[in-house]
Image: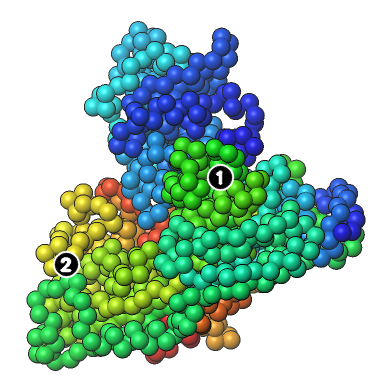
């Protein structure tokens, strides 16, 4: 067990956990931040995506010991009132079906638009290829990202 | 955590006093009054002390209160179809409520809500009329109450946007009538008038799902998101082979992992595994998920792997390929296929192979149980809350009244989460450790221990006479039956499974013989989105495309012709067993050839089928009625620069009766195409009784770059009874895709996964 000081959604938070515990379980089990989801444990599906210094990472396979002071942003932290342009576009296009993968999809979309505010279809497909949606909402995700890119 | 499950919209603790929640214990007294599954005729009052909010709950689905809140109860499980929105909106439309202010709460498992088994695409089919009636009954009472207040006739009043409105323009909020409603007699059903379709404001329109914003903000509560004080987490190492037993185990290494607390043996029942029993396993109980997962890996279990340990799925395919060469058990017979083939000018003889599939819901199975002496409360993402309740009660040896099952949102279901095995696991482990427990399946657990869609072999022979007419159709189908998961003696596909897209071959062919063969189940077989329709539709539609080619005809023209006159079909005289018709009588839900022709014609028109397509692309066609919904599909394929298959365009035409929520109908078809493409490209294999694939690397469902792009859903403006849309998008997609691939590449597809 080690002490870690984490910057999550702009707040400094102390945790005492094994250094190999994936960040996902620190968020979910230790900090009760349930918006980030477990999907595969191998970084294959993207349900657990958060931003680490702005880059999308798969927290299910990212040990907390590797965070090393980087700033973490989760689905709970991208807006105060749930009105980030990506979130608004998700609601406008009624993207979700079951909804389970959507936190991760949204975080990947936010990361994409942060570095590329006007992505092409190909840019979107490439950036989102690490996020699986078993319900098959891919086309609405793409449309929502295009809408969000106009409202950034 | 309180008994009212906290969906995020209902987390206001004041809700407990404001809203009469039908799951509260005092409501159970009304249980004996329920008839026919629906509580529509009981005037239940819940008056608070003076000055407090009072509520009026005239049935188990609708609650009005004096604060002018209309609360609707969703009693079916939300796994992504939108049913948690679509049934309440039917009630709200009849009621004349203000949809933007509606509150929706999720029902717990209880018979008083009627059927809660969210499966078989029948939520809308079964509950369209009861939901209308529930809403209309309350509307009737509201107009009566307002009319009395205003000393006018009720016929001069109507409801809209949460108010009763008189013909002279007077208005009163529903909330201001709650006290009056409490003194009224419930109307007789014959007094209640349903609205005309033309006056609906919600039904037949795009209504956004209720949970969209909660999902987009990460606040929506799925199974694993439920947190109880003092809750432990368990991860279970199950027998790698179905039917295996743990002879002994060593948990010493597991117990050294920080956070691991103890282990608990879970008894499986061996073979048959059953649909609602846990598999044999050892649960590692920890104070966090990561520790439990590590503990699972550290267990050393000595297994007796049991009778399925030498099972090889590819070897079974070889055996099935042999069996379809012989005569099988005849399940439907019209005329005499043998003489038709004997006198045929040509006989096409083709065999189709489809692998096992896993559901791979994005949320792996998970359940929370809090066992206490004399009461066990459960939270689970379950499609079938009442079965979960029964299974937990049975496993614990408790009466059902002492088991409460709360239903969370489901991170996907597709049939997997009908089976309550994982819920039972949570209850057993909670009882063993005397604390609340979340049993968390890993993705590997999910892929290894599913209830799989059965692998299958089909052989279809088609006889063409001297005029090139189809004179005979002989369909052999063999696959391990779902029934064998409970009863190993079930060696043939059941009547029900044949009813899924095989036995009701609707085309005018004078000689038809449908046969089945024996095969054993060596794993747990279950139902997966559209079930046997997946393989039946693949084989039949691929064969019909080949028949059209042999006749030199366009398949659309051929099929329209082969459907004959518009009429209702009755298969019973030819079927050696029951024709299930998805649980509905044929007089209520007829099998109508005209409706099938309509979707074929519509999809051909919308896709410009006859106009052809640019070189480098190809279109394929298929049609499949399933779950009483008529669907035709055109899939366009192309290859990208790397030679990988692309699906640039899909057209669906659907007749699902009166469309309820058109946005969710479209979304089911959009997603159904994606789901079906995954089925076409992947599969599950067994070696030595164990599943070879582990995670999304080996069982590769499609990602955005491979996904079908422009999916056009053409919804027929039908006046027929509404039917479901969760499963019907899947069956026609795969053969339409394969028929398109043939046109693009010249290679007919007889075996899945599809290799291009």
Q: Is residue B125 left or right of residue B387?
A: left
Task: Answer above or below: position of B665 versus B696.
Answer: above
Q: Choose top left, top right, bottom left or bottom right for residue B67.
A: top right
Task: Answer above or below: position of B667 versus B75.
Answer: below
Q: Residue at x 37, y 47 (%)?
A: B124
Instruction: Examine the rendering and report whether any part of residue A48 can be seen.
Output: no
Q: Which mark is residue B575?
A: 2
Q: Which one is in front in this view, the residue at disc 1 or the one at disc 2?
A: 1
Task: Answer above or below: position of B423 versus B740.
Answer: above
Question: Which x, y percent locates residue B206?
Answer: 46, 47
Q: Residue at x 45, y 72 (%)?
A: B523
Q: Is residue B124 left or right of residue B209?
A: left
Q: Residues within 10 Å of mark 2 (few under 14, many from 20)?
A: some
State how many labels appear. 2
Q: Secondary structure at mark 2?
A: loop
Give the mark nearer the N terminus: 1 vs 2.
1
Question: Which x, y percent locates residue B467?
Answer: 11, 86
**Disc 1: which residue:** B378
Q: Residue at x 28, y 57 (%)?
A: B582
View extreme (top): residue:
B151
Q: Chain of mark 2?
A: B
Q: Closer to the camera, B36 or B274?
A: B274
Q: Closer to the camera, B75 or B313?
A: B313
Q: Closer to the camera, A76 or B315?
A: B315
Q: Is residue B257 left or right of residue B170?
A: right
Instruction: Examine the rendering and report whether any part of residue B295 can be seen.
Output: yes
View extreme (bottom): residue:
B345
């Amino acid at each position: 067990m080690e002490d870690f000081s984490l910057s999550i959604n702009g707040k400094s938070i102390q945790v005492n956990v094994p250094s190999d515990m994936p960040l996902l379980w620190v968020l979910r089990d230790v900090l009760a931040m349930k918006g980030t989801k477990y999907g595969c444990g191998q970084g294959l599906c993207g349900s657990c995506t958060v931003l680490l210094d702005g880059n999308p990472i798969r927290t299910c396979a990212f040990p907390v010991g590797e965070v090393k002071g980087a700033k973490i942003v989760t689905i709970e932290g991208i807006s105060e009132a749930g009105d980030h342009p990506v979130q608004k576009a998700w609601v406008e296009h009624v993207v979700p079906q079951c909804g389970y993968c959507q936190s991760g999809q949204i975080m990947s979309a936010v990361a994409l638009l942060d570095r590329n505010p006007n992505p092409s279809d190909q840019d979107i497909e490439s950036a989102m290829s690490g996020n699986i949606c078993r319900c098959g909402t891919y086309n609405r995700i793409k449309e929502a990202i295009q809408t969000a890119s106009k409202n950034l | 955590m309180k008994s009212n499950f906290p969906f995020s919209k209902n987390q206001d603790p004041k809700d407990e006093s404001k809203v009469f929640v039908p799951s509260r214990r005092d409501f159970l007294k009304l249980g004996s009054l329920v008839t026919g599954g629906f509580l529509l005729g009981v005037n239940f009052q819940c008056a608070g002390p003076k000055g407090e909010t009072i509520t009026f709950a005239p049935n188990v689905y609708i609650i009005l209160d004096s604060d002018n809140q209309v609360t609707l109860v969703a009693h079916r499980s939300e796994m992504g179809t939108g049913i948690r929105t679509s049934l309440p909106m039917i009630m709200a439309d009849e009621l004349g409520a203000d949809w933007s202010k509606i509150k929706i709460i999720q029902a717990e498992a209880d018979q008083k809500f009627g059927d809660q088994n969210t499966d078989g695409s029948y939520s809308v089919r079964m509950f369209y009329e009861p939901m209308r009636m529930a809403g209309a009954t309350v509307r009737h009472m509201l107009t009566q109450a307002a009319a009395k207040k205003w000393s006018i006739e009720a016929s001069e009043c109507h409801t809209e946007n949460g108010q009763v409105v008189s013909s002279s323009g007077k208005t009163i909020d529903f909330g201001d009538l709650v006290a009056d409603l409490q003194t009224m007699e419930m109307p007789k059903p014959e007094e209640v008038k349903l609205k005309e379709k033309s006056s609906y404001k919600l039904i037949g329109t795009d209504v956004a799902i209720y949970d969209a914003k909660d999902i987009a903000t990460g606040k929506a509560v799925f199974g694993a998101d439920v947190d109880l004080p003092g809750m432990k987490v368990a991860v279970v190492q199950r027998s790698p082979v179905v039917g295996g037993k743990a002879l002994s185990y060593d948990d010493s290494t597991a117990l050294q992992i920080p956070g691991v607390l103890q282990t608990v043996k879970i008894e499986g029942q061996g073979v048959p595994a059953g649909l609602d029993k846990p598999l044999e396993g050892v649960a590692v109980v920890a104070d966090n998920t990561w520790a439990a997962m590590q503990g699972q890996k550290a267990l050393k279990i000595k297994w007796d792997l049991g009778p399925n340990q030498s099972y090889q799925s590819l070897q079974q395919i070889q055996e099935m390929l042999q069996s379809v060469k012989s005569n099988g058990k005849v399940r439907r017979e019209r005329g005499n296929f043998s003489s038709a083939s004997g006198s045929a000018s040509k006989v096409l003889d083709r065999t189709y192979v489809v692998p096992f599939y896993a559901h791979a819901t994005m949320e792996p199975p998970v359940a929370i149980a809090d066992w206490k002496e004399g009461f066990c409360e459960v939270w689970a993402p379950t499609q079938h809350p009442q079965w979960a309740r029964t299974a937990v009660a049975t496993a614990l040896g408790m009466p059902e009244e002492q088991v409460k099952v709360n239903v969370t949102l489901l991170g996907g279901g597709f049939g997997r989460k009908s089976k309550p095995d994982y819920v039972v696991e949570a209850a057993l482990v909670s009882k063993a450790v005397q604390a609340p427990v979340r049993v968390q399946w890993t993705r590997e657990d999910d892929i290894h221990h599913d209830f799989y869609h059965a692998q299958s072999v089909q052989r279809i022979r088609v006889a063409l006479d001297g005029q090139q007419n189809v004179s005979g159709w002989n369909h052999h189908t063999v696959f391990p039956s779902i029934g064998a998961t409970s009863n190993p003696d079930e060696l043939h596909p059941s009547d029900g499974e044949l009813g899924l897209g095989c036995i009701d071959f609707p085309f005018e062919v004078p000689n038809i013989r449908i046969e089945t063969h024996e095969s054993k189940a060596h794993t747990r077989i279950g139902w997966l989105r559209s079930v046997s329709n997946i393989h039946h539709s693949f084989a039949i539609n691929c064969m019909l495309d080949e028949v059209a080619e042999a006749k030199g005809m366009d398949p659309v023209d051929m099929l329209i012709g082969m459907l004959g006159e518009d009429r209702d079909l009755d298969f019973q005289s030819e079927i050696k067993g029951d024709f299930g018709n998805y649980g509905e009588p044929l007089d209520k839900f007829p099998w109508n050839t005209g409706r099938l022709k309509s979707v074929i014609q519509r999809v051909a028109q919308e896709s410009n089928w006859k106009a052809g397509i640019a070189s480098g692309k190809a279109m394929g066609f298929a049609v499949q009625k399933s779950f009483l919904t008529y669907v035709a599909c055109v899939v366009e394929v192309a290859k990208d620069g790397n030679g990988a298959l692309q699906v640039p365009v899909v057209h669906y035409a659907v007749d699902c009766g009166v469309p309820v929520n058109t946005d969710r109908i479209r979304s089911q078809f959009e997603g159904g195409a994606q789901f079906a493409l995954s089925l076409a490209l992947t599969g599950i294999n067994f070696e030595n009784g164990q599943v070879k694939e582990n995670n999304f690397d080996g069982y590769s469902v499609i990602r955005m770059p491979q996904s079908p792009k422009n999916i056009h859903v053409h919804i027929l403006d039908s006046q027929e009874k509404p039917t479901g849309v969760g499963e019907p998008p899947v069956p026609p997609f795969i053969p339409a895709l394969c028929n398109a691939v043939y046109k693009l590449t010249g290679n007919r597809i007889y075996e899945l996964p599809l290799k291009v």
